[in-house]
Image (cartoon, grey):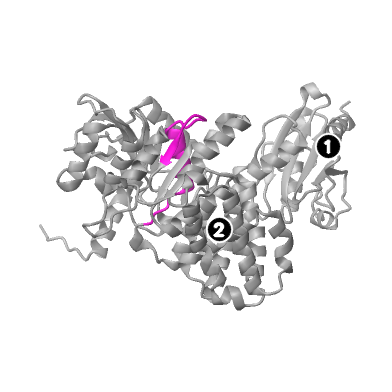
Amino acid sequence: MANERKTEQIVRSHFEKDNSFIQIEEQKSDILKIDKALKGASKKGDGKGRPEFIITFNNNNDFLIVVECKADTTKHESTNRDKYSEYAIDGALLYASFLSKEYDVLAIAVSGETSQKLKISHFLHLKGERKATQIFGDKLLPTQDYLNGYLKSPEKFRQDYNNLLAFTKTLNEKLHTYKILESQRSLLLSCILIALEDEAFRVSYDKITTPRNLADFLTKTVSDKLENANIQREKLDNLNIQFGFIKTDTSLTTKDGLLKELIGEIDTNINQFIKTHEYFDVLGQLYIEFLRYANSDKGLGIVLTPPHITELFAELAQVNKNSIIYDNCTGTGGFLISAMKYMIKDANGEEMKIRQIKSEQLIGTEYQAHIFALAVSNMYIHQDGKTNILNGDCFNTEIVEQIKRKKPTIGFLNPPYQGNKKTDIDELEFILNNLDCLVDGGTCIAIVPMQKALATTGFVYELKKEILEKHTLEAVLSMPDELFFNSDVNVVTCVMIFTAHKKHSPTKKTYFGYYKDDGFIKRKIQGRFDGLGKWDRIKEKWISYFINREDEAGFSVNKVVTPNEEWCAEAYMETDYSNLTERDFEDTVLNYVTFLLNNRIKLDDE
């Protein structure tokens, strides 16, 4: 006869090993909020729910584990997951659905009477969400692994990121109310985040009695932190100038409690996000959000690269612990931070190598002083890399020679997008500059407006010709039309991939990818994001097809090209008619009619 007590004992013994940092309760909880949430969660629908185990963490009040056990492995899961009293998964998900009104819940279903024949299933149900997501595999894990896995999960990231965006909107409105300039808001945030790295500042800032003294204490702390980090005097003076407005801003220095309140809110809502989700360009994303609300920097050509694309670059270039990365248009440092993530992962815990990566292998140049300050701040927050970011013109001969001496192997860039002025530097000139700095055989990946790939005459054609005379065009990837939706800049782009200092062979085939669908969706508050969780699977295909140079009708093609031709997949790939439906035809006609109406075009009668 099946004995559920045996199953419970296996689970109990597994978690009791970690009772120094967790609390294990059975059937009910002494925590009032949990007890209240389980009211009505009975598996038979006639009262309070009583899970086998409820596990809470001493150092995390937002997350708990609920476990449901069954002795018989045939009672692990029903077809529709609606037989709550009979099946382990069904019951665990029921309890999670009630508890998720107050907590992030990991529901664990366990069936079987021996460790060898145990069936395990895990589901993560985040607070306020409608559904749970399967996670973790089919074995019981150490309790700390559950906590870490939950904190680092894509589901938790999406939730935290949405909360971050919501806070950013509120913060932006507050800063607007107090007339803090749009151009200074990200600098204020970065200054506060650096200061919060200092333990003395953290424990004493709320004891400062006047706003002016707090502003002085904040900027002095940041200046001292950066000086102790061996920032060169010239760079340090530049940064002190950029952060100097904090000591003179009327609201920050006279409004009682405002600066103190901002520091507390940023610590809770932004600093905690950074600590949980490492190697994410937070300042870059906040800068984008401020631009979306302020809409003030379009004329500067600022188009910050979405984080999933900066990570895509690192994987396309197959970044590893020995790579030396150079970004000649650093911006807020998004490419360098993503590269750092993959490099440190490849170092596999080798501390000396990790220190070398952070101090020597991440190089950048940024022209605009206030963006340079954000880049340095960003790298500081991510523990180094800052000392190799230069504030200056990447075309300056001295800077070029200085970069070359560092022997970068991989170049990443998203150059300033050329405006209407003929004096503006062309995006392909930035690519040539980056390629020039790389070692022979180095890889350069750039994201530029599609019109640069399509040019077959004029100045851009001459630049294409110069590139192929010196370097090899490995691939061009057509990007989603609304990739930069979050930056509120209307530009269709492509990714170009080059091998440095190897003249393009006239018989060389270039890979062209129609990478138009990254699975992202749009929402008013979140902007454009991976709301359906499709990106990881799509990215895997994108990378695999590029590495293996695979042809697929309607998706990719390999083609010999010259500067006289268009560098885009659309010009060469075959159409896969097998996937076309009547709906595709209807949508095309409707889009065409809408275009005619919007542009007030009337077709002449035949």
Specify the label residue 190 is tagged with: 2
Q: On screen, 346 above or below 309?
A: above
Q: Position of residue 123 (x, y in %)?
A: 69, 41
Looking at the image, the residue that sits furthest to the front is: 233
Which amino acid lies under the numbered mark 2 shown in the image of this protein?
Answer: Ser
Specify the label residue 329 is tagged with: none
Depth check, mark 1 against mark 2: the one in front is: 2
Give the Cα distance between marks 1 and 2.
38 Å
Q: Position of residue 140 (x, y in %)?
A: 75, 31
Specify the label residue 18 is tagged with: 1
Which amino acid lies under the numbered mark 1 shown in the image of this protein?
Answer: Asp
Task: Answer few, some or many: residues within 10 Å of disc 1's Cα (few below 14, many 20 plus, some between 14 and 19).
Answer: some
- Name the N-terminal-most of marks 1 and 2: 1
Question: If the image is split into quadrants, where does the N terminus sit?
Answer: top right
Q: Name the side, left or right, on which 470 lies relative to 291.
A: left
Disc 2 secondary structure class: helix
Please name the residue shown 74% across and 60% down the image.
Answer: 203
Q: Position of residue 590 (x, y in %)?
A: 30, 55
Q: As rendered, which of 184 and 173 lies closer to the eye? A: 184
